[in-house]
Image (spheres, helix red, strand yellow):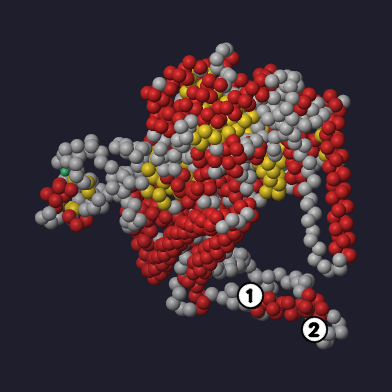
Amino acid sequence: MRFHIEELEILFPYPRIYPEQYAYMCDLKRTLDVGGKAVLEMPSGTGKTVTLLSLIVAYQQHHPEKRKLIYCSRTMSEIEKALAELKALMKYRTEQLGHEEEFRGLGLTSRKNLCLHPSVKREKSGSVVDARCRSLTAGFVKEQRERGEDVEMCVYHDNLDLLEPHNLIPPGVWTLDGLMKYGEEQKQCPYFTARRMMPFCNVIIYSYHYLLDPKIAERVSKELSKDCIVVFDEAHNIDNVCIESLSIDITEDSLRKATRGANNLDRKITEMKSTDAQKLQDEYAKLVDGLRDAGEARDEEAFMSNPALPDDLLKEAVPGNIRRAEHFISFLKRFIEYLKTRMKVLHVISETPLSFLVHLKDLTFIERKPLRFCAERLTSLVRTLELTNIEDYQPLQEVATFATLVATYEKGFLLILEPYETESATVPNPILHFTCLDAAIAIKPVFDRFSSVIITSGTISPLDMYPRMLGFEAVVQESYAMTLARKSFLPMIVTRGSDQGVLSSSFTIRNDPSVVRNYGNLLTEFCKLTPDGIVVFFPSYLYMESIISMWQGMGILDTIWKYKLILVETPDSQETSLALETYRTACNNGRGAVLLCVARGKVSEGIDFDHHYGRTVLCIGVPFQYTESRILKARLEFLRETYRIRENDFLSFDAMRHAAQCLGRVLRGKDDYGIMVLADRRFQKKRTQLPKWIGQALPEAESNMSVDQAVAVAKKFLKDMSVPYEGLMQEGISTWSLSDLKRHQAKKEVEEIEQLQRDAEMEGLEEANGNGNGVVNGNGNGVGNGNGNGVGNGNGKVVDEFDMDEDDEEAMMALDG
Amino acid sequence: MQRNGAVPAPFEDAEEECPICHSKRYLRKDMKFMINPECYHKMCESCVDRIFSHGPAACPVAGCNKTLRRARFRKPTFRDLQMEREVDIRRRVAEVFNREEVDFDTLKDYNDYLNDVEDVTFNLIQNIDVEEAEAKLDAYAAANKQLIQSNMKRAKEGVDTFRARQEAAKESAQQRRKAALQEEEETRREEEEERRNLLKALDAGGDAEVLTRQSQEAMRYRAQIRKEALANEISANENANGSAQFTIRGLKKHVEKEEEEEEKPYDPFDGLSDKREYFVLQEDYGWENYDRLNKPEYSAGGYNIHEYYNRALCEAFSGLGVFIGDSSDEAPPAVASAGAALAAASPMSDDVF
Ligand code: SF4
Ligand SMILES: [Zn+2]
Ligand SMILES: [Zn+2]
């Protein structure tokens, strides 16, 4: 379908469009036109990705400057999905336009997923693959070979150098699979092909980390130009990603390994001094002038990168006392020894970076400034020493990164030292958490650098929370309702059991047998009435375990067993994927199953339960975070102090975004249907914090129900759903054909004109009134959001079945670091 | 040296044993080890008591012939005694070489200085050319006695300010926390009250909808006011703290680029030039007052607006290049700029403005 939004022609690869997709495009275009940041919430299962891509690609092709799109998503499967959508879109464009556009779209993921080297690719761990690859591709290895030494290199990497550097791969959209195949045919490395082609791509699709983790971003995303359009999809957790990318945990074990690394380096330096002292001397000479100059030659394979160092610092000369290699090693050793000493305390300590630095200086005479250069200095040394077995130095690198971070940031970080793993442990196992409290730090470079940043997800309510936490101002903030021809999902809040006793997972009563029994009762009832799959979410593993064992004792599980197969998520991902497999089989055959899982676990984030895989989702208890965690407490305090976000507001926001994620799992498209039950008294008050599209479908009357009421409503709902339903009934209401769209646009235009006329009249009126104070109430909200709730019958196959492939792998990308 | 109360009580390692009496921690739970900075040989507390309580004695470790005194025994900070020794040496060096970045005219000078200091330290630690290093240390100490003293004082002041500031920050954080709690409490109370009032009014037979709306609005309004008041109070607090923290440091002597001592034409003013160091005179400063007056009908003969600009700027910058330290005799040679001596900020803030 082809249509215009203002001057822009959009080619949309489906014959019909949802009203909310159209609205989303309009807002997106507005954001791109004015530049700036946007937060957009689009109901899950309404084809967000394809909408986004069609608009942005149209925008790119329309404007001569062809701004690049950087599309960030979270998981491998999401990236694959987006690439496939893009490919289909471009195919459609070619058909429609009659010629192929000059266009390149590439996805990037870790080496582990893309490597072709026969022995390297077989390594299990991502970091080993990275390290081995580096030792086969590093710049000095090549030099060594040119000198005639016999060193092993990767042919796939070498072959790239034979190609034109800006044309390593023909234009077009390459899915990860396609890229691998092409690489195999041409004997060229897919990973480096993608990385090197990045500056020449129109669309790049990769994981968040490539942009947010300063340790990686510096290397991978440095060359992207300012006018890129950056999109963070599935961004409801973006603040946590930001924080994690700057937080470091140090254990005694890692310190031991770091010491070993430092000793190795020491030995290498001595060796080199006797064989090739000139190299060290050269390095020294370079460092006198400044790091960046020394690092200029740094190739894409640098050992590691510095964490978010301000640029001017990099240009500065390295402090005199760590210029010499042996001085620097002694410096590192001293720092590690200090950390070891700190690890030996028996009580919890939390302190700010500043006070840590003062104490450090008192004890070891380490100043802040050289500390700050640690990471960069180490990189330079490793390069000079031409080390190949880089993976051995990982722990040392971590310590150096920590050093740099702690010396760079005064605010927004906290050091927490916990001598014991758990409250009850007697054997100390100290961990030094260097935790970032401020999500804005990691994302700031992104905001500073790129003019258009779009943050979007299916559940990102309340919208204003994100700008506050991430420290930006949004030019457009929008949440779209879901237009439905019939009500296809039923959100309910159940607050009481059938005996009118409260339902709540609050700490004081969560283990009350009556509460547990009521929850059990709720589950049993829904197992009886739901066809196929049920997914149940608990706030935590601990709580889930205790409830399950209590249910066992009460015989509740036995009852459920009669209706459904019971499967449980565990922290072990292998076990969980097995459970999921079984769950799906059970849903496909016969009476279905119930999957018990955790609201912050893997299932809740990455796995879709479309159609019969999930007809009911049951949220048992509000999924609050574990508030006794010291890190969380520190973060809460920080949020209150810095962004004036109250503890309870944040906790409740956080709980609700996870709850919303859970609910969104079962509804993956407009022809899907499902029941969403929030079972806790406390949800009643938090109703307003649900995303708009869920909130709208949740009338007041259904937000305070008892179990038997809920059962009755659910039964009725399912009965309605089972009435055959004609796809045609959706026409013009929840899906628009081209003519519907045109009608809508025309109507809007008329409205706009009328509005203008009214304004003009008003002005005239005011003028006529002289300087009288005429009350103006021109309500300029001319966006008609065709919204209707018709009920019909017939079961037409709805045409647009995109964005709902099933994927159960939540292979979080293994990253290079 | 111990501060923050954070210096650790070392973990007990059951296998650790005293190299002198061979008793194990496993058997004597409260066993403590001590070292003497003469030789850094470790032994248990009771051995120390036993051997050295009657005055100086030789170290009991075989091959070590140092004479040790009871008084100098102490508990080590680091597990690694090599490190213990290193840090002791560093302390000694740091007490002598205590110049900071602000004391140098260029960053390069400072870095070279650091490099040299580290060379000396490193040699001392690694026992390379110890005599030479010691000699350097002594020579420097003798040559810069006064400077060392004043730097020490400055460092101490720096630490004090830092601590005071930490305290202040902690206090204000507590205050804010309290205020926030209070606000929450107040909100709750008011809501409660409002509800009661509402019920009363309803009892009296008012229109439920209107009353509810009214009361909600009132509540929102009050919350708003409270929030603003709180924000004001906090920012006032912060400002008060901020002004106390303001210090000047880092004014540097303006260094001329090295001039070649070549034969030059005779300069009657001996290098004094009328070139401006700190500003470049611009054609126009766009100040409308003067634009208005700068017309031929208003100016006297020979009046030139640029002369005025020049004078004004000159006045504004005069004195910036004069360093009191240079003209006073007491000042140590070549090093201290008045700015640096004045500087009392914490050693932590190394950004120079
Ligand atoms: S260059 Fe490519 S193919 Fe070769 S080892 Fe590295 S990732 Fe694998
Ligand atoms: Zn002993
Ligand atoms: Zn001895």
Residue depicted at 84% across the width and 42% down the height: A748
Corner quadrant of residue B289: bottom right
- Circle 2 chain: B
- Give the residue number, with chain letter if any, for mark 1: B317
Furthest residue to the top? A589
- Position of the N terminus of chain A, as image quadrant, is top right
Corner quadrant of residue A627: top left
Could you tell me residue B268's position as x and y percent?
A: 66, 80
Q: Give the Cα distance between marks 1 and 2.
A: 23 Å
Q: Please check whether the numbered discs 1 and 2 fall on a single chain.
A: yes
Q: Can residue A612 be seen in this snapshot?
A: yes
Could you tell me residue B75's position as x and y percent?
A: 25, 50
> Dot 2, crowdedness within 10 Å: few (<14), some or many (≥20)?
few
Residue depicted at 50% across the width and 48% down the height: A648
Amino acid tagged 2: Tyr
- Give the residue number, with chain letter if any, for mark 2: B303
- Position of the C terminus of chain A, as image quadrant, is top right
Residue depicted at 19% across the width and 37% down the height: B26
Which residue is more in the foreground, A111 or A26?
Answer: A26
Amino acid tagged 1: Phe
Which residue is more in the foreground, A44 or A635?
Answer: A44
